[in-house]
Image (tube, coloured by chain):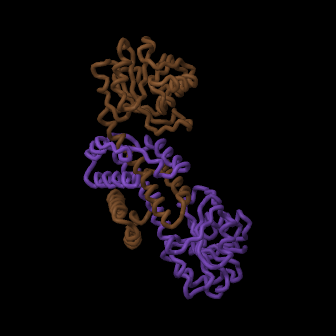
Chain colours: A purple, B brown
Amino acid sequence: MRIVILGAGRVATHMAKALHKNGHKIDAVWSRTIESAQRLARVVDSFPVNDISVLPTDADAYIIAVKDSALQEVIAKATKGREGSLFLHTAGSMPLSVFDGYTENGGVFYPMQTFSMEREVDFRAIPLFIEGADARIRQLAESISEHVYELSSDDRKYLHLAAVFACNFANHCYTLAAEVLEKKGLPFDVMLPLVDETVRKVHELHPKEAQTGPAIRGDKNVMAAQAALLDSRMQAIYNLMSESIQEKA
Amino acid sequence: MRIVILGAGRVATHMAKALHKNGHKIDAVWSRTIESAQRLARVVDSFPVNDISVLPTDADAYIIAVKDSALQEVIAKATKGREGSLFLHTAGSMPLSVFDGYTENGGVFYPMQTFSMEREVDFRAIPLFIEGADARIRQLAESISEHVYELSSDDRKYLHLAAVFACNFANHCYTLAAEVLEKKGLPFDVMLPLVDETVRKVHELHPKEAQTGPAIRGDKNVMAAQAALLDSRMQAIYNLMSESIQEKA
């Protein structure tokens, strides 16, 4: 397909690279600043633009990977005179209905990953969640990812929520561990082999089956002694997580 | 050194292999069943025994890697007639004082890792926490690990507590994520690229700096909408974790 990329941030960059690598032609890259557009355009053999109105009108698909807060405005400008093309946004938290009134060929193209500019990713391994009536959406998705799922805007809320637990809250558990260690002058690094192994295990087992520790063993002595070492908020977290582990066991 | 291993479980196995690999002579392996002792003895070119009283009396060190509940009994039997040798236990949750009354050459040798029988580990990368007055303990530790820390029994309690957050509670976050996904018919596998990347980040950044998500952004709309999707206990966890993320930011 001939594709235009709107945005030059982390999602836009990794997605444009994946499309380019898989044989699609990136007609143009738009970004608010020409420098950002140029930086990405160079990498994907494309044409940099900082004015939406000069973008080609005949590309097959326009992929909009911009901040949630800018999405509506970019959709309004990009669809103008291009209503017949396919328009996809990449924002996990925004519904399909953001296209209402602008185009009937809207869709969602949401990769479930946290991207860094510096780190290359294997896009084929990233789950890609799509939504929209147009059959070309799935075709395009399958050309860059081996894990394509259709998901409604309503269900995508749950996907997002799950990601908060699996990423944000898991990471916060590391922060709390680091705080406990720092009291004794130990660096968080001493946890890394354990943290790595914990994650490796859930590649093979359901996390419920991989659970270890005093709560799942019902070791009340250890649990009481550990809770007593904590301040009141961390104690509340400790007790609530322990109860939840026991309830889900 | 000439070493006797007491135990043939996961810790005993990985530690015996690491010692053997690094030039120590494993004189004997004791286990309650001769089959277990044989299985490990074969791997580390040693002699299997299921009766503590027949173990050599002149080894340099006796490493006791048995269940917490069996430790006291094994120490009592193993030290008898061997009081002058070095005795080490590998139990993170047991104090140095378990040796009191049995030997004055006791020490702790605690590897911070969760072991599986099937998976080979790079023991040199595993943090090894030691305790005890004898200078040979550090020497032996440094012969198998590049990350040796001295830690008192009291401070080791905090290490354990940190491990509960970094491993047990982080894993429980995955369980909760899996539960949210299952409601929508999605497998936990769709989270794995995100989970992997979350862990890779804390190899480079302090977890506090790696934090992402609605709580750290102070995005109250998303937080309220997400909490509303949850049952009461998970809602309590969601709110408490979010508050804690904001407090530690």
Please state the horizontal and vertical placement of residue B111, each as a whole percent of the image.
44, 34
Please state the horizontal and vertical placement of residue B68, each as a whole percent of the image.
36, 32
Is B86 in front, or is B91?
B91
Is A14 in front, or is A113?
A113
For the point 47% across and 68% down, the residue is A158
Q: Is residue A142 above or below residue A82?
A: above
Q: Is residue B168 above or below residue B17?
A: below
Residue A102, located in which quarter of the rendered image?
Answer: bottom right
Residue A42 appears in the rendering: no
Residue A238 appears in the rendering: yes
Residue A168, located in which quarter of the rendered image?
Answer: bottom left
Is A77 in front, or is A229?
A229
Residue A11, located in which quarter of the rendered image?
Answer: bottom right
Q: Is residue A71 left or right of residue A124?
A: left
Could you tell me how many numbered marks the image carries? 0
Please state the horizontal and vertical placement of residue A165, each as a whole percent of the image.
44, 59
Please state the horizontal and vertical placement of residue B120, each as a whole percent of the image.
56, 36
The quarter of the rendered structure image containing the C terminus of chain B is: bottom left
